[in-house]
């Protein structure tokens, strides 16, 4: 393996803001979780990011990355900003037994393209953040939760990251033994 085969390099996790204006604290925590997810993927090749390492699961780090770009776009662009047609990359999906769309691990999109798409989705969310959080009590509607407010949506996005960073931690340890907080 050469350095040019590595998809994600040099991830720096930002310090979290622990006090201050509510939007600043939330934005800081989101960026911390985004960077922590990428840190779990750092130093791996396309093949390793696609590797299924747990016999009981089809999850891969690349599949989680595809999912998290969808989380960013679904919640920030569609639900909070009201954009009707976010520019999703056309990843191959399937419908799970529970009726949810999930990303097909056989999707041939190269990992570096998925990574760039994920970074773009995060940047799109950052650009919208101040606008969509100006009124945290504003009611929004989503297919998953019905009518809720902006605060709940932001908490849900952090919850998504926390859950999937935990998955990524287990997957990374199974891939090459790398561990970290």
Image: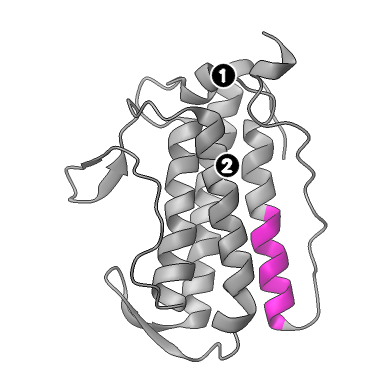
> Where's residue 81, x and y in %?
46, 77
Q: Residue at x 51, y 91 (%)?
A: 137
Q: Residue at x 42, y 22 (%)?
A: 54
Q: Which mark is residue 116?
A: 2
**Residue with the most extreme top position:** 1
> Where's residue 134, x and y in %?
60, 88
Q: Earlier in the sequence, mark 1 or mark 2?
A: 2
Q: Which mark is residue 8?
A: none
Residue 129 in the figure: left or right of residue 63:
right
Which of the pair 65/147 is nearer the observer? 65
Magenta stretch: includes residue 26: yes
| Element assignment for label 1 | helix
**Label 2 Cα neighbours within 10 Å, binned few <14 / some 14-19 / many ≥20:** some
Where are the magenta residues, as a range? 22-32
| Element assignment for label 2 | helix
> Where's residue 43, x and y in %?
69, 24
Q: Residue at x 39, y 70 (%)?
A: 78
């Amino acid at each position: 393996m050469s350095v040019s085969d590595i998809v994600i390099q040099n991830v720096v996790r930002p310090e979290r803001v622990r006090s201050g204006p509510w939007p600043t604290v939330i934005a800081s925590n989101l960026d911390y979780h985004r960077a922590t997810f990428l840190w779990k993927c750092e130093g791996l090749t396309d093949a390793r990011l696609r590797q299924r390492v747990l016999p009981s699961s089809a999850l891969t780090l690349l599949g989680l990355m595809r999912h998290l770009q969808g989380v960013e776009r679904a919640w920030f662009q569609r639900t909070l900003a009201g954009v009707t047609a976010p520019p999703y990359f056309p990843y191959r999906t399937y419908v799970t037994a529970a009726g949810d769309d999930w990303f097909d691990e056989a999707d041939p999109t190269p990992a570096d393209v998925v990574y760039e798409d994920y970074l773009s989705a995060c940047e799109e969310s950052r650009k919208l953040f101040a606008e969509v959080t100006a009124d945290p009590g504003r009611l929004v509607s989503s297919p998953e939760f019905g009518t809720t407010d902006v605060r709940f949506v932001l908490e849900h996005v952090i919850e998504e990251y926390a859950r999937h960073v935990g998955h990524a931690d287990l997957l990374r340890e199974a891939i090459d033994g790398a561990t970290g907080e």
